[in-house]
Image (tube, grey):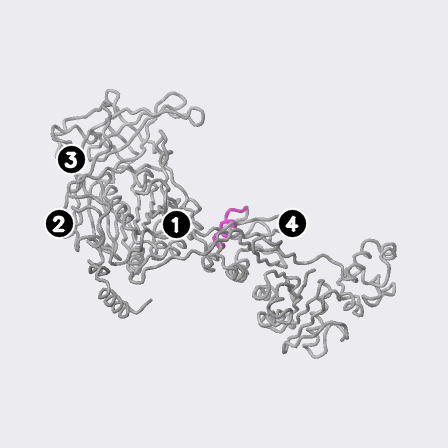
Amino acid sequence: MPDPAVLRELERRLEELDPSRARPPAAGPTVSTGVALLDEILPRGGLPRGEPVEWLGPRSCGKTALLRTLVRRRRAEGEPVALVDAGRTLFAPDWVGPEGEGGGEETLWVVRPPSGKEAAWCADLLLRSGGFGTVALLLGDEAPGGGRGRTGPGLRRSVAVRLQRLAEEAGAVFVVEGASPLAALRLRFRSGRVEPVGGGAPFGPFLPGVRPVWVRVGGGRRAEVPVLCPEPGDGRPRSRREPAAARDRKGRR
Amino acid sequence: MGRIASIRIARPPDAPAHRLAAALLEASPRVMVAAPDLCRADARGWERRGGEAAFARAVHAAAGVRVGVGIADVRVAADAAAAMAVREGRGGDGPLPPTSADATPVDTGPSRTRIVPPGEARSFLAPLPLEVLGLPGPMEETLRTAGFRTVGDLAARERVELEARFGLEGIRAHRRALGEEEGLFRPPPPGEPPEASMELGDGVLEVEPLLFVLGPLLDRLCDEVGGAGWHIRRLVLRLGLEGGGKREIAVRPARPTLRRDLLHELCRAGLERSAASGPVGEGRLPAPVNTLSLRADERAVPEVRQEDLFTSRSRDPAAASAAISRIRARLGEDAVVVPAPRPHHRPERRSRWRTVERPAAGGPGTVGEGGSRGEAPAPAGASRDETLPGILRLLPAPKPVEVQCEAGRPAAVHDGEALHELAVAEGPERLSGDWWDDPYRREYYRVCTARGELLWIFREPRPDGVWRWWLHGWWD
């Protein structure tokens, strides 16, 4: 590695010769999530490099949508991204990059281990290589009813210690979709009631609607990010068991 | 015409032949273990590096123990020359009497070398006793009884006479005496991929001994490939099994490389998978392995990537490739994939993943620690007013569930653990097709549980006409 002092001196002399080469000062070891509303509430304005980030929430809370935005932002900045999909539940059409299906050089690799037991080992290898700027470990949801407040699958402490050290050495963004004992940053996601697009009475979660996702960060800071529900239907029959107005935003009667 | 080097251990307990053979790969790409105290190697290819004398010195240096080296056109002559060299190294004691044959001694210090010039194997063997031919005991005794004492006595006779007196064995003995035998090591034809091989004297059933000799084989092959300016894109590990069978294990790193540690690890994973999948299992191969060879099936020009001098940290694509290769070696070729969806009505077929062939060298430029928010323009992301689309999570295989219906529409879902009341059910969306291949007929419902989970369920008729409900995924 070249001597940092020599590099700085070279940069200074080059800037004297050519002011257009001046580089803005580094903003610090954080990266944007790609969601402005979320970046505003995060400490230091982004996700930290080299520190595990716990990305936790019940099923259908919107955390995957936010994760995909993060992945797209990292890829667009030219950073190789690796996802470890322990549950093998990612839907391929949602993860195609801007360059299209298979065109150009990929910057996203998805590891789909045959069983969830190898997921932590895969994350270990990916972080240890130092070849990926962002590694996300999706520990997998189980049956419906993961429930609000339940942390679901998580890392053992010994594994978390090792992965935390590797992330630090690699200087990579390391996101764990699951409980992570040594997370430096914990994001809690929770979804609210669907609001109709354009006002009017809410129909339900699908037609057509926007569902707010609340993200809570330690220290009481909270942001609300709108997430679209699945594509509006074509007017197919739907049934509702009781008017939505009778339920609060937690779905309780 | 081949040139064979026989290397005989001066004091057999000094080193086992397998270890000697592994060390000899430094000097020759083709080595075999012939006896507990004898190895043979291909002595060709040193014409531009100082000739056979230099080859002999390299062999002695690689062996690490006192050995006698004999180099000749044929096996018998090389073995005899090696025995002579051992005897001379001992100061005259040894299995053969001294001879003023044409073998040229090469001074290599405490170890000795005898080189029989090309084409002179017959004259070299002539004065030597019959025992150097390595004939079966009864045949040798028969020839001695018939009055043959030296190899030259046998070589001087007509072959038809020997055939008449001793049959097929007589012909074989005569051919050996004349120095006629097929080449022991065949060089790869021009244009063939580089290869390094080793013959193991006794069949090997365990994986660990093979891994021991794999390292020197890889070193040899990488030196040869790298010396020509190439990297290895695909490697084939070939096991020659007892009984004539063969097994090939292909190793393909994610990126052309000459990294021996990575290639060794990938070969190791291949061998262990081969052992695990065999009928015996538990780290034992299906049959004893007699030969082990490595062939660089595909080679590629090494990739050169121009880095930015002022980037404080860049992501090394070679390291990323190595990690991907290791994951694939252990978990299978399709463990690391990229999304490659295709249009299809069936959701699980729409979600297609493609095996990674060649990881990218990184996006435009490299990303350093300075690549933080606010530095580079934000090419993708949600602004304050933007709404993100919901993402589907699809189960690898639909999961059977029990659904309670009211007025023919889903009202509650039981997943085997708990009952989840449904607040909303939208559908059915009917999908069917593939009648010529794998017909399906499904009615999909998008439902929302009372707790706010957005699930995707469907029902499908069974052959007996009863409808069965399944959970296919959820939105998150």
Task: Say the numbered circle drawn on residue B359.
Answer: 1
Name the residue carrying label 2.
A221
Q: Who comes first in sequence, dot 1 or dot 4?
A: 4
Foreground mark, 1 or 4, reads: 1
Query: What residue is shown at x 78% (from left), y 68% (from top)?
Result: B123
Calculate the distance from the C-alpha at mark 1 to the C-alpha at mark 3. Answer: 42 Å
- In the rendered structure, are the residues bearing label 1 and label 2 in contact, judged by CB atoms less than 8 Å apart? no
Q: Amino acid at mark 1?
A: Pro
> In the figure, is residue B163 to the left or right of A176?
right
Is residue B215 visible to us here? Answer: no
Give the residues drawn in magenta, as a range.
B267-278
Chain letter of the residue beneath label 3 in the structure image: A
Spot occupied by residue B371 in the image (x, y as percentages of width and height): 25, 55
Q: Amino acid at mark 2?
A: Arg
At mark 1, the secondary structure is loop
Q: Amino acid at mark 4?
A: Gly
Chain letter of the residue beneath label 4 in the structure image: B
Instruction: Tell me, yes or no, whether dots 1 and 3 are on the same chain.
Output: no
- In the rendered structure, are the residues bearing label 3 and label 2 in contact, judged by CB atoms less than 8 Å apart? no
At mark 4, the secondary structure is loop
Name the residue carrying label 4.
B243
Asked which quadrant contains residue B402, the reply is top left
Spot occupied by residue B384 in the image (x, y as percentages of width and height): 15, 43
